[in-house]
Amino acid sequence: MSRIEELQQEAIQLLQDLINTPSLSSEEDQTAAIIKQWLEKHGVSCQQQQNNVYAINKHEDPSKPYLLLNSHHDTVLPNSGYTRDPYKAAIEDGKLYGLGSNDAGGALACLLATFVYFYEQEDMAYNLVVAATAEEETSGDYGLNSLLKTLPTIDTAIVGEPTQMHLAVAEKGLVVFDATISGTASHAAHPNPDNPIYKIGAVIDWFQQLEFDRVSDALGPVKLTVTQVSAGKQHNAVPADVKLVIDVRVNDLYTNDEIEQILEAAPCEVKARSLRLGSSSIPMSHALVQAGITAGRNTYGSPTLSDQAALTCDSLKLGPGDSLRSHTANEFIYVNEIEEAIPLYISILKQAL
């Protein structure tokens, strides 16, 4: 049996162990222990910060750039549609079932196996870093964004998410805004020319008509959506204000700060909840992208958010599985997707390392 075949089998077993161990966001201590033990079993010297486990290749050279392999081991809550035990890994008809199998346990297990493959290699062009991180599903404070303060400066990253092993060369960022339409509170029986509810139509029309001129080749236009409206508590009282929530998916041609500045012109008060979930991209000319294209992979822009949002370096989203299966009942990943991902990761990295 070849080294790659051994790692394929061990990655599948690791994924089953992770599925069998609940790891909701901020409650990943048990899966962190499993990952740390797995790496140490393979002779890897690794560290842990909160529920994040990380390691650097054996022959680290601080004068060389750092390439990060990252994916997460937290999961969402299992939804009510499950007919299987979400915490019991089972292989049937070539499918490995279980919560987190597709998002993103498969990618994580494959990236860990890939790191082990290169761990003792000398004279690489990059230092290779692997990070199995927490709190991705909730964009929490103690996931990759906090670990980056401990890691060496990362120059390039591969983020493992289900992309069918195609190359997500860009990812939209996210800004959520809270908006307030102000008016005058009053009793419903009395005249009130400043009823904030009557202003909703004009305000929503402003957001609906807003255009963002810069259209990305990979990600298309910025997508703004009013997702929530709330006002009033009782039938006979005009409220003092109306609350809106605006979801903005930002392409790689705008910064989140620029989006905030544009929305300052709205005919209501607008405040961003956070500006840290920025868009991500990697040049098409980058060696990782070109290696993937040579291997027959397609490139595309991803509308879904991942830990790429925590990175400021060039980053590529790439992993086994299908994003459409994420967060669905009876989540699964095909065993052959895992088996095919590891040699593909290795092939792509060999051209960069």
Image (tube, rainbow, N blue to C red):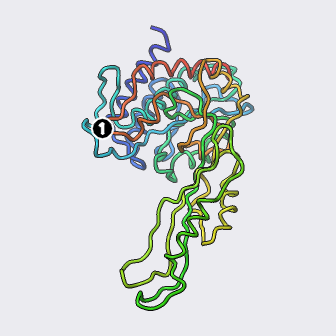
Side of 17 relative to 59 (left or right) = left
Q: Is residue 312 above or below residue 292?
A: below
Residue 190, percent from left and from top: 44, 91
Q: Disc 1 on helix, strand or loop? A: loop
Residue nearest the viewer, comparing 334 with 246:
246
Write down the residue under mark 1. Answer: 86
For image coordinates 55% across by 26% down, the residue present is 115
Residue 184, percent from left and from top: 52, 85
Residue nearest the viewer, comparing 197 with 35:
197
Residue 248, percent from left and from top: 58, 54
Residue sticking out furthest to the bottom: 190
Locate the C terminus and report the quarter of the image it occupies: top right
Residue 223, percent from left and from top: 59, 51
Q: How many marks?
A: 1
Which image quadrant for residue 127?
top right
Residue nearest the viewer, comparing 195 with 63:
195
For image coordinates 39% across by 32% down, the residue present is 101
Q: Amino acid at mark 1?
A: Pro
Which image quadrant for residue 152?
top right
Q: Residues within 10 Å of mark 1 (few under 14, many from 20)?
A: many
Q: Is residue 55 visible?
A: no
Residue sticking out furthest to the top: 1
For image coordinates 30% across by 38% down, the residue present is 86
Residue nearest the viewer, comparing 13 with 330:
330
Q: Is residue 94 above or below residue 267?
A: above
Q: Is residue 300 visible?
A: yes
Q: Is residue 223 above or below residue 22?
A: below
Which image quadrant for residue 234?
bottom left
Q: Is residue 123 above or below residue 219?
A: above
Locate the N terminus and report the quarter of the image it occupies: top left
